[in-house]
Image: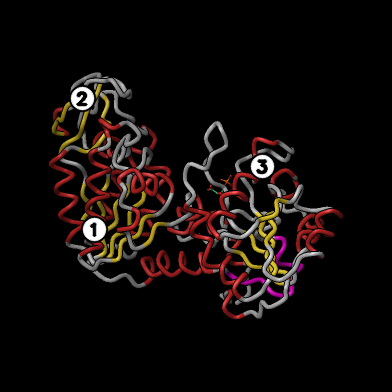
Amino acid sequence: KKTLSSVSIQGKRILMRVDFNVPLDASKNITDDKRIVESLPSIRKVLDDGGRLILMSHLGRPKGKVNADFSLAPVAKRLSELIDTPVTMAKDSIGTEVMQQVLAMQDGEVILLENLRFHPEEEANDPDFAKELASLGEIYVNDAFGTAHRAHASTEGITHYVQSAVAGFLIERELLYLGKALQDPERPFVAILGGSKISGKIDVLENLFKKVDTVLIGGAMVFTFFKAQGYEVGNSLVEESKIELALEILAEAKRKGIKLLLPEDVIVAPAISADAEFRTELISAIPEGMIGVDIGPKTAELYSREILSARTVLWNGPMGVFEIDNFASGTMAVAKALADATAKGAITIVGGGDSASAIAKAGLAKEITHISTGGGASLEFLEGKELPGIAALND
Ligand code: 3PG
C-alpha cells in the first residue's frame, strides 16, 4: 500500500481518518490515550511538512444522532496538549461552516471534525456523505487501523472520491507486525489465545494453525475443551454447541504437529465477584458449583516457559477475569512473560482489545514490541480477513 511518505504534503489540505474512539470516564476524561498517541507519527509528519491537517474520527456508538456525550472535544484538548499546538474543534463533520473553516486554514494548522457517527450516513457508507467528506481535503490518509474492519463512509466510501488514498504510519506499523507474524514469523512462533468463547476465536485459531508452532489456550473457552474431554467443570462457562468443534480443534492440532496446551490447573470461585473466595484446583478436580476464573499458578509457569522459548509471540485474549485482581494472576503472568521474551530478543505482539488493557494494567506496555490499537480490527486481521478500510487504499 502507498503510505504517507509517498505524497507531497506542503500547503495541502490533508484529510486524515484516525481512530480516536478512546475510553472516557463519567467526567469525560480520557482514561487511555493510546490511540491518540499512536497517531502522532502521522500527525507530526503532516505538520512538519507544512500541511493543513483535517482529522476525522468516530467516538462510541451515538447511533446516527447528535449527542454531546459523544463529542470529540475531550480528544481535541488532549491532542492539543500532546502536540503542543492548538487543535480547532469543528461543530460538525460536513456542511458549509466546516467547508469555510477548512478553506481558511493555514499551513501547520489542525482541525478535528466532530464525531462522524452523528450522521447515520457514516455507518451506512452513504456515497453522498462520503463525497462531501472527500471534498474537504486534497489528499486522504487513513490511519484508523482500529476501524479498518468497518466499510464506512470515512474509511471505504471516501476512497472513491479522492485522487489519492494512502495509509498512515500507524496502519503501516500494524500491518508490518501483525502481517509478519501471519506470513513469515521467526520460529518458534507461540500464540496465546484467551477469551470466553471458542466461537469468538475459532477463525483466529484456524488461521494461526497455518503458521504457529505452539498454541497456549486460556480464558473461559478452556472449559468447553475440558467438557469435550469428559471432565466435570462445575458452573464454568461452557459452549455446549461447540463441544464437537473443540474435539476437532484438538485433533487438527495433533494432525498438524502443533503443540496445543490447555491449563493443568485453574483458579475457581463460587461467583465472579471481587470478594468471592477462591482457590487453585487441578482441572480434573473442579468441584461442583465452582466457576473457573483464571489459569492456575502451575499453568502460568508452564505457559511462561513456552513464551520465553519463542522468537515470535502473539497474544490475543486474557487468561481469566483479570478485571478482578484475585483472578488476574494468570493474565499478569503471561503479560510478564511477554515482556521478558521481548527483553530476550523475541518479537512480541499483542492483538489489541482486552489483552492490550491487561498489558496496560501490568504496566508493561513499553516492554512489548507491538500492541495493536485494534480490537475487532486486529481480530479480523488475525482471522485472515481482508479489512475494507485497508483494501480500499492505493497500491
Ligand atoms: C473499536 O473500538 O473497535 C473501533 O473504534 C470500532 O468501533 P465500533 O466497533 O463501534 O465500530
Cα–Cα span, label 2 and label 3: 42 Å
Q: Name the residue under label 2.
A: 278
Q: Mark 3 points at which residue?
A: 71
Query: Left or right of 72: which side holds 250?
Result: left
| Of the pair 267 and 343, the residue shown nearer to us | 343
In percent of width and height, residue 72 lies at 64, 46
Q: Earlier in the sequence, mark 2 or mark 1?
A: 1
Disc 1 and disc 3 in contact, CB within 8 angstroms: no
Question: How many other residues sit within 10 Å of disc 1, few (<14), some (14-19) or many (≥20)?
Answer: many
Cα–Cα span, label 1 and label 3: 44 Å
**Number of the front mark, 2 or 1:** 2
Residue 245 appears in the picture as rendered: no
Look at the numbered disc 3 and give the secondary structure of its residue: loop
Q: Quadrant of the N terminus?
A: bottom right
- Residue 214's label in the rendered image is 1
Residue at the location (19% across, 42% down)? 263
Quarter occupied by residue 3:
bottom right
In percent of width and height, residue 81 lies at 55, 54
Look at the numbered disc 1 and give the secondary structure of its residue: strand
| Of the pair 226 and 192, the residue shown nearer to us | 192
- Which amino acid is tagged 1? Thr
- Which amino acid is tagged 3? Ser
Q: Give the range drawn in magenta.
A: 157-167
Quarter occupied by residue 325:
top left
- Which amino acid is tagged 2? Phe
Q: Is residue 166 magenta?
A: yes
**Label 1 CB sits under 8 Å from any ligand 1 atom:** no
